[in-house]
Image (spheres, grey):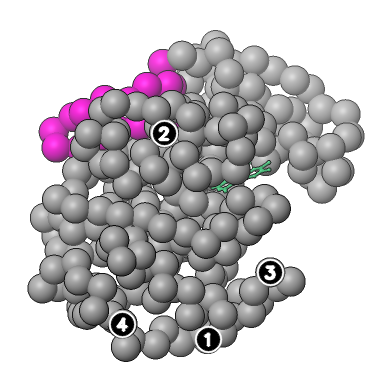
Amino acid sequence: MYDFEYQRATSTDDATSRYSAAEDARFLAGGMTLIPVLKQRLDQPSDVVDLGDLDDMRGISEEGGAIVIKAMTTHHAVNTSDLVASKIPALAHLAGTIGDQMVRNRGTIGGSLANNDPAASYPCAVLALNATIKTDKREIAADDFFTGMFDTALDEGELILSVSFPIPEEAGYRHFPNPASRFPIVGSFVAKGSDGVRVAITGAGPCAFRVTEFEEALSGGLNPDAIRDIKVSDDGLNTDIHASAEYRAHLINVMTRRAMGE
Ligand SMILES: Cc1cc2nc3c(=O)[nH]c(=O)nc-3n(C[C@H](O)[C@H](O)[C@H](O)COP(=O)(O)OP(=O)(O)OC[C@H]3O[C@@H](n4cnc5c(N)ncnc54)[C@H](O)[C@@H]3O)c2cc1C
């Protein structure tokens, strides 16, 4: 690990001020990604601004037909929330599939979305549920947020405050886990809400994406048979030691049917 200045923020305003005043800062949330990156000397920030004391960045509530999850809420808190389980059970289920118990106890929804790992679990839920990401500067629609591998619409120093998930009529999530890390090799989230059916995939490409062929085929309802014969192209999908692009394309169909209860 290279040397850096460690700072503890006392409020969200204090966090963004400390960030701006530093030469090249990083926010620290659960540290499940940032700390290993620093330990491996893959990044060399001048300052690390710890958000750990900001209790007003934690919590889950229901507001105007949506479940609002604050950025520092851990995966464990989402997984075990009675409110999430009653309103969007698929989201509680997804949070419970992330990594292992230690990762879920420390890792946060804000850190996961800001990091935008190609295999991160939350992005497909954010896209399929048509969520809105609220930052210290603005609100960003899910469709505009994920811009590439480890890349998002966030500006330098922009702090995620919360994510608002409209409550769907029906939703489901299934993933095919990497047996070592538990990250999804392919994960599919299907949601039927006021703006129709949305299907989003994580793990298969450089970042999460929607599958419009499936969405059109499912406009009559969440029926696995409606997509059974649709072959998703493997163009642009990831190939690595875990799975080829062709296999990932196959899994997209299988996981989406399973997300609908098959
Ligand atoms: C063994 C292992 C298995 C895992 N398996 C999975 C899995 O199956 N699915 C999955 O989705 N993830 C998985 N993860 C990643 C885990 O979910 C992390 O929690 C997540 O990627 C980062 O969240 P964090 O709170 O730890 O963020 P940190 O590591 O603290 O920060 C990550 C990045 O986000 C930035 N950041 C943090 N909070 C904010 C904010 N509020 N606003 C703006 N920027 C912010 C930081 O500056 C940093 O660049 C795994 C991790 C490990 C170590």
Q: Is residue 20 visible?
A: no
Q: Find out whether the residues at labels 2 and 3 contact each other: C-beta distance under 8 Å.
A: no
Give the amino acid type for the residue marked by disc 2 in the picture. Answer: Asn
Residue 255, quarter of the rendered image: bottom left
Mark before the other along the chain sequence, 2 or 1: 2
Task: Indicate the secondary structure of the residue bearing disc 3.
Answer: loop
Q: How would you rate the neighbour count of disc 1 (Cα within 10 Å): few for under 14, some for 14-19, many for 20 or more?
A: few
- From the image, tell me which residue sits under label 2: 79
Mark before the other along the chain sequence, 4 or 1: 4
Q: Nearer the viewer, mark 4 or mark 1?
A: 4
Q: Nearer the viewer, mark 3 or mark 1?
A: 3
Q: Which residues are magenta?
A: 56-71
Kindly report the distance in space between the C-alpha atoms of the residues bearing marks 2 and 3: 27 Å
Q: Nearer the viewer, mark 2 or mark 1?
A: 2
Mark before the other along the chain sequence, 4 or 3: 4
- From the image, tell me which residue sits under label 4: 228
Q: Quadrant of ligand 1?
A: top right
The structure residue drawn at horizontal position 32% and vertical position 88%, both measured from the top left corner, is 229
Task: Indicate the secondary structure of the residue bearing disc 1.
Answer: loop
Q: How would you rate the neighbour count of disc 3 (Cα within 10 Å): few for under 14, some for 14-19, many for 20 or more?
A: few
Q: Above or below — where is 130 with respect to 136?
A: below
Kindly report the distance in space between the C-alpha atoms of the residues bearing marks 4 and 1: 19 Å
- From the image, tell me which residue sits under label 3: 242
Q: How would you rate the neighbour count of disc 2 (Cα within 10 Å): few for under 14, some for 14-19, many for 20 or more?
A: many
In the image, 36 versus 259, the foreground residue is 259
